[in-house]
Structures are given as C-alpha cells and as structure tokens.
Amino acid sequence: MNNSVLHTPVSKLTLGFSPCPNDCFIFDALIHNKIDTEGLQFEIFMEDVEALNSRAFKAELDITKLSYHAYAYLTKSYLLLNAGSALGNNCGPILISNFEFEISNFNTAAIAIPGKYTTANFLLSLAFPDAKNKTEMLFSDIEDAVISGKADAGLIIHENRFTYEQKGLKKIIDLGEYWETLTKTPIPLGGIVVKRTLSDDLKHKINRILRKSVEFAFANPKSSLNFVKKHAQEMNEEVMYKHINLYVNNYSIDLGADGKHAVQLLFDKAQELGIINKIEEEIFL
C-alpha cells in the first residue's frame, strides 16, 4: 500500500455485500486495508442479496450490492458504479426439479425462488410470465425444499449450480442460457450502487477504491481465501473458486460499453413486460 499520500479521514460509510465467495473475493482488499482506501472507512453489513435488496428499498445503506432487478425500482435513490458488478456468460440461475418435469405443467407448479426482486426471478418471469405460484426463501434452502417435496421446482443461484446434480436434482432450464440466446448479451445479475445524495467526488472515489480492490483480488487470488472460506456456504475450495471465476471477471473491474448495454437491455425488457416503469434518470456513474 502506498502510504506517502495523506487523505482526510471521513466518517464511516455503510457498505452492504453478500457472504458469497464472489463478493468476499471482491471486497476483501477494500475492507482489510490491503489497498489505499483514500481515507474512507466502512461499516460492513453482510447479508443475503435479497436482504440487501430490502435494505435498499428503505435507503438504509450508503453503498450496497443489489440485484439488477431490484435496482430497476431504485434508480431515483441510487446510482450504479462501474466497478463491482456481476455479469457474465453461462452463469445464470437454473430451474431444477426432483423429477422429470413437463414445462407444459409449469404454470401451476409450486416454485421456490430466492427472492421477489432477484434478477433470477426477473429472468423466470421473462421466460414463464404465467408462472405465479412462487414461494420466496433463502437461496441456500431451495435445494432441500425441492428434495423434500415442499416445492415442485426451485430456482437456484450462486454455488448451488455446482452442487444440485450431486443431490440427484435435474435441470429444467438454464435461464442464463435463455437470456443469452434471446439477447446475445451477458447476464446482468448484480451491481454495486451508491446513494445519489453523496457528492460526485465521493462517488468517484468509492468507485476508484472498489476497482482497486477487484484488481488486487485478481493480482493476488489467494489473498482473500481465509475471508472467502469463513463465509462460504460450500466449504470445498474447488467449488468456491468455480463460483468466483463464474461471477468475477472484466465486467467486475469496469462495466464498459458492453456491460452497460446488457444492463440497459435488461431494463428495456422489464419495461416492455410492464414489470417496471420507464427509467428517467441516468443510471451509470
């Protein structure tokens, strides 16, 4: 770390992200002072992404991880950073069942979802707009709900895409593949947003620090291992790094033109379906 530059300390900013391996990998350097945070300090809230979505609807956090679906409703309160996003290919949510499932029966099936405002649920609504019998639950409980018969089908995200087959569960449809075939763009899953009420200088500083944290993680991929392992649901190291490699990529350093196009397309599709109202604000930093 470069200690030669002095920065004026500021009060702590509230920062929310999930305990999933990709978020721990991204934020490790930032919260453990492995990079220069330019005088910024952070009060950390680590919660499931749907819990973070709920906090964002109350504007509780200065900076937070957010599902892109949830962000579509919150553009008046938050601005999207260029760094920290989870976009990619072959990394979308997967709909699973415990038995061979006829898609024709899908509209009446009981489906476990990881949250109303998750991008996973948006993609499910896009593919099956008439599927209404949904139950929200913590993403890590969905496999067991399907196995026990509490749900006919489950929408899985995160590291569960690496474990469901080991438990004898079957894929109905990969909604990431569905999105990529439909749009020819990567899947926008989640991003990092900041309150619009923060100063422009502070917003850019936060983005700069977050980018440094991602770049440090790429340059030192084992540095965050203890932090990732401490919070990972799946403790197998191979699975943890599969998860990280799936969701952390060049779009996490900077959205760039392609990433921004994919996000805008997601919102355009949601507007076409009447899921969200037209967004008037500039959403990108």
Image (cartoon, rainbow, N blue to C red):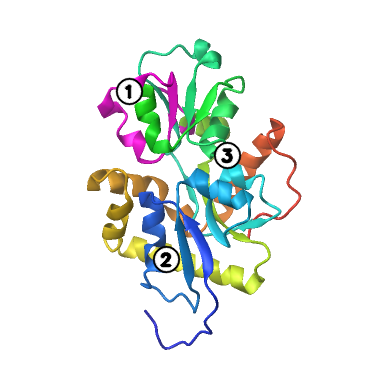
Q: Identify the disc placed on residue 1.
A: none
Image coords of residue 11 (percent x, y): 55, 76
Residue designated by label 2: 213
Q: Quadrant of residue 256?
A: bottom right
Judged from the image, the secondary structure of the residue bearing numbered disc 3 is loop
Q: In terms of sequence position, does the residue under pointer 3 or pointer 1 come before the other?
A: 3
Q: In terms of sequence position, does the residue under pointer 2 or pointer 3 come before the other?
A: 3
Which residue does the image show at 57% across and 51% down from the upper left?
55
Image coords of residue 243 (percent x, y): 34, 45
Q: Identify the disc placed on residue 117.
A: 3
Which residue does the image show at 57% across and 22% down from the upper left?
128
Figure quadrant of the N terminus: bottom left
Mark 2–mark 1 Cα distance, whole angstroms, equals 37 Å
Residue designated by label 1: 169
Mark 3–mark 1 Cα distance, whole angstroms, equals 25 Å
Between tags 2 and 1, which lies in front? 1
Q: In terms of sequence position, does the residue under pointer 2 or pointer 1 come before the other?
A: 1
Judged from the image, the secondary structure of the residue bearing numbered disc 2 is helix
> Magenta region: which residues?
147-176
Crowd band around label 2 with a 10 angstrom C-alpha radius: few (<14), some (14–19), many (20+): many
Figure quadrant of the C terminus: bottom right
- CB-based contact (under 8 Å), mark 3 and mark 1: no
Q: Is residue 270 above or below residue 249?
A: above
Image coords of residue 37 (percent x, y): 46, 74
Crowd band around label 3 with a 10 angstrom C-alpha radius: few (<14), some (14–19), many (20+): many
Q: State the residue in front, 160 or 252.
A: 160
Which residue does the image show at 35% across and 61% down from the upper left?
218
Task: Let me know if residue 150 is in the magenta part.
Answer: yes
Image coords of residue 34 (percent x, y): 36, 72
Mark 2–mark 3 Cα distance, whole angstroms, equals 27 Å
Q: State the residue in front, 149 or 2.
A: 149
Q: Quadrant of residue 145?
A: top left
